Amino acid sequence: MLLMAISGSLLLYKNELLMLLYPQLALAEPVSVSAAGTIADGFSSGYALMPTADRPWFEVVDAEKTHYYYDANGTLLLERHYLGDTMSWLVELHHHLALNELGKDILGILGLLSIALITTGIVRWWPRRGSFSRALSVRWFNPFSKRGMQTLWQLHRFIGVTLFVPIVIVIITGTAIMYAAPVKSVLVSLFPQTQQHSLPPLPDKQASNWSQRLALVEQALPTAEARLLYLEEPQIRAKHQTEWHPNGRNYLQFTPSGTVAKVIDERSTALGNRVSNMIYPTHVAAIGGSLYLTIILLSGLALIVLPISGVWFYVKRRGQRLK
């Protein structure tokens, strides 16, 4: 829990930390779409992230998970190798403990256990006599002193109760990401309703390079913009302005000859699929502005304090019993 909380709290500010660690990434203006297309033509595998206001560079990730960062002139600003810096370690540890699929399985199980832990904590705390305000009071003593146990216990319960809702949101959404496929399947089964959104006819132009493919996004999905490029089997992910997911869940797929094969508009998919697509942005605070970001940050800090205060209290209490 400590590892997830520390890495997750820092990753809320991933782009800011990248620019702090690598000042050359702090570009004055985002890389243009045409420049991004030209740079992408130099790669045949992996994926690429389109520039945005908070991520102004053009980023390519190859099959070896090496990240390449470019400016508008196509100049390579930075090359980050897999597990080659602190940021890479933070990402890999938070996503799957740097253990690939095994790590995801471990995190999924720990996520379910964490939900049980926080829920039983609330049940144990719930006042049976007296007021809620008294049950939330914290008296401050040196945690290393004899009366420090009282402060540790009261601080533990105060944080767990006051931030219970955002903590549960973070844990549930994080666990759901580990079990993304079954969670989506269940949600689609429960909420199969769809709503149709009319789309223009498929563009009949051939697109032999990424600049031409990107130019077709506006024709195929007029209210969306390209966010993610799949470089090996050409495909573009796009985001509607009202969509929660930062990279969107709309797809523009191409045939080997370069024509548009299929357009998938997320708004026309099952309600369960649309709800599933809201899980990740809820977890990473991609919605709700600075207020929600602050709430999620507080929940991350709470998940740092809770295990420390809980284990510390347990050790002190056990030590007193053995005396």
Image (cartoon, helix red, strand yellow):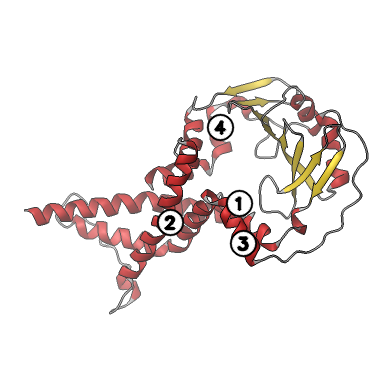
Residue under label 3, please give it.
Answer: 187
Viewer-nearest of discs 1 and 4: 1
In the foreground, 14 or 183: 183
Residue under label 2, please give it.
Answer: 112
Residue under label 1, please give it.
Answer: 281
Residue type at mark 1: give it: Pro
Contact between labelled residues 4 and 2, with CB atoms less than 8 Å apart: no
Name above or below for residue 247 compared with residue 50: below
Outermost residue toward the bottom?
129
Residue at 86% from the left image edge and 37% from the top image edge: 215
Q: Secondary structure at mark 1?
A: helix
Residue type at mark 4: give it: Leu
Q: Residues within 10 Å of mark 3 (few under 14, many from 20)?
A: some
Label at residue 80: none
Question: Alpha-carbon distance for marks 2 and 4?
Answer: 32 Å
Location of residue 274 (image quadrant): bottom right
Residue at 46% from the left image edge and 60% from the top image edge: 168
Question: Alpha-carbon distance for marks 2 and 1?
Answer: 20 Å
Mark closer to the chain start, 3 or 1: 3
Residue at 65% from the left image edge and 39% from the top image edge: 54
Residue type at mark 3: give it: Leu
Mark closer to the chain start, 2 or 1: 2
Residue under label 4, please give it.
Answer: 18
Q: Secondary structure at mark 4?
A: helix
